[in-house]
Image (tube, rainbow, N blue to C red):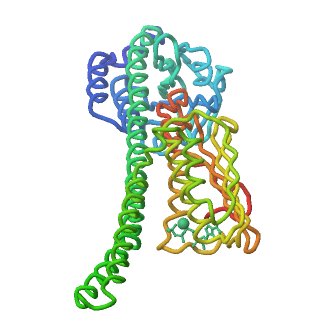
Amino acid sequence: MSAPDDQERRRPPPAWDELLRRIVELSTVERDLRTALRRVAELVVAATGADCCFVHVVDHEHRELVLMGATPEEFDRLAGSIRLSLGEGVSGWVAAQARSTLVPDKWSDPRYRYIPALRGEDFSSLASVPLLRPPRRVVGVLNIHARRVGHFQEEDLPRLEEVAGLLAGIVENAVLYDQLQRREAELEQFVAKTVELQELERRRIAADLHDGVGQRLVSALYHLEAARADVGGSSAEALLATADGLLRAALSDTRAAIGGLRPPVLDDLGLGPALESLARSVGGEFDVVLHVTPVQAPPHVETALYRIAQELLQNVVKHASATMVEVNLEHADRALALEVADDGRGFDPDAAPSQLRYGLAGIRERVELLGGTLQVTSRPTQGTRVRVSLPLAGTDAAGGSPTADLLPEHRGLTGLPGAVPDSAGGAPGVVP
Ligand SMILES: Nc1ncnc2c1ncn2[C@@H]1O[C@H](COP(=O)(O)OP(=O)(O)OP(=O)(O)O)[C@@H](O)[C@H]1O
Ligand SMILES: [Mg+2]
């Protein structure tokens, strides 16, 4: 009686069809990659009479195989922590060659690499099969170990390769699913930011209406009441004249608030001329020097820069007591940079911002949302310089999920402006 015959008799024929059916079933319900791989490992061991099974997934970025699922449980607990270079050990060889291999007795195979945590001394033979996606892209390796020498036969390989084909699909689907979730989370974040910004804008409008139109109307009413009480009296004319003035001012505030909601000048003239008209509107109290390079930018970038310029110039009017303001708009390194610098009294940008102030906080929100940078350089008595740079191209969204990291060629499905560059940049006086 020959040894292989003896071994064949002792190993019941693997239930391949049942195994494949159950893996397909599993792939339709299990969304978690680690759980799916552990379950597949269990099914493979049960169907083939082997003793343990490992599923390694390729980490393309680091050119490594990472253990992602195994059976028995004690090995599955090591998922994520066992890494092999491509080319290292039997699995590394299989991944590098994109070819299956049988190792009847691993102690006599030079490719075998002993990993103490995986208790190699307990197992003698193994079959190792690449997880391939068309055309021949390796996304992982399926490794099945048995205590017996020569547990697997050549004819097992095509069936194991079918199993590995299904597994490769599971790995890829999980990565895509994971990316979808990541993209959804990014979208949610984006929406939340937008809503937050809208809220900020609404609060600002409410404050503008309250402080401007509201106050003037209250005052006008007061004057009208006084005039009514004094009808025929000598001061009626003067009171009515004041009320008239207040109502006109309220009307002009209302126009300004409406203009602030949507700057039609942008649509009519474009960013450069709009900035010129803005500068003219604040001129008078100080000189405005304008350097505007003609530029083409997406409408949302133009609107953001216009709004930011508006707020910065208002700040100069309200706080700076400046004699001169410089406004620069330039195209710099695939970004549009706006700089507003005054020679006024300056302030300490590191001082804790008040909850009631919207201006600089609103600018920071806008800039972050668009993936740009903001620098506020100011010191008491030294003037204030604010520089905002907004990218003209979309920024890459950096992902952080473990599955996506393993197959980085799938990353970056979205170009949402999720990554907010450090606005500090080591410059003095950057808005916190
Ligand atoms: N150009 C500037 N010169 C001097 N101080 C400034 C200048 N810009 C801002 N500041 C100071 O920074 C503070 C914060 O500015 P911010 O625009 O956030 O708020 P605000 O102008 O006071 O209120 P809001 O913009 O909400 O109407 C101001 O109160 C002011 O003290
Ligand atoms: Mg302000």
Q: Is residue 302 above or below residue 154?
A: below
Outermost residue to the right? 382
Going by the image, does 298 lie left or right of 214?
right
Residue 382 position, x and y percent, is 76, 69
Residue 267 position, x and y percent, is 45, 39
Residue at screen point 73% across, 58% down: 426
Q: Name the foreground residue: 123 vs 373.
A: 373
Residue 160 position, x and y percent, is 42, 16
Q: Name the foreground residue: 66 vs 402.
A: 402
Q: Name the foreground residue: 368 vs 23.
A: 368
- The quadrant where ligand 1 appears is bottom right
Going by the image, does 385 lie left or right of 21?
right
Residue at screen point 52% across, 45% down: 370
Going by the image, does 402 lie left or right of 374?
left
Going by the image, does 304 lie left or right of 343?
left
Res. 186 image quadrant: top left
